[in-house]
Image (tube, rainbow, N blue to C red):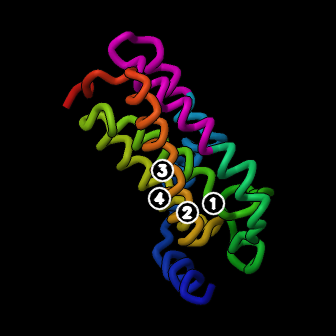
Amino acid sequence: MGWEFDWLYCLQKIHTPWLDQLMVKITSLADHGQFWILLGLAFLCFKKSRKIGIAVIASLILSVLIGNVILKNLVARSRPCWIDESVALLIQNPRDYSFPSGHTLASFTSSVSICLQNRRWGIFAVGLAVLIAFSRLYLFVHFPTDILGGAALGTASALFIYWVMKRKGLFLQKEGG
């Protein structure tokens, strides 16, 4: 854990008032997966993007079950802000365990699901997912390996759902770019 704290403490040195506000806003997009759920539901509303919506919602369900319900409780890893309480938090102290990062998990599973079917939209979504993941480190609520674990599991969930849907004939061709 030493190197992980080194990274987190390094990030504490770049804090500025405007960056603090920005990171709080960015991280709040993924609170309870709300942005990604709403985006998935929005995709469902239009015939052209319906398959993307199905993939986003299905991969979110899968990743939440594996990551938040099973792994978080199985690993039961303390958060950096629980171990070092001297760092002032800019957000409410999370109550659930640290590994994997749920914000990162939801962001990567959704953005990769989008990217697999529409590269133009996916590039924006993956960029947002990276910012959300970074915000969790900046805000001192996750270790780097929590972020890597969330990104890996989210990507794997999206790829699995894509594979299942493709196998079932739900994807005849990629949509868009």
Q: Which residue is disc 4 drawn over?
A: 18
Q: The residue tagged with tag 1: helix, strand or loop? A: loop
Label 4: few (<14), some or many (≥20) within 10 Å?
few
The amino acid sitting under disc 2 is Gly
| The residue stretch that appears in magenta | 38-63
First-in-chain label (1 vs 4): 4
Q: Which residue is disc 3 drawn over?
A: 156
* Residue most extreme to the bottom: 2
Q: Is residue 76 magenta?
A: no
First-in-chain label (1 vs 2): 1
Q: The residue tagged with tag 2: helix, strand or loop? A: helix
Instruction: Choose mark 2 or mark 4, whichever is in front.
Output: 2
Distance between the Cα atoms at labels 1 and 4?
A: 28 Å
Q: Is residue 51 above or below residue 130?
A: above
Q: Which mark is residue 149?
A: 2
Kindly indicate the quadrant of the structure image that contains residue 64: top right
Residue at image location 60% in from the left, 34% down from the top? 34
First-in-chain label (3 vs 4): 4
Q: Position of residue 33 (x, y in %)?
A: 60, 39
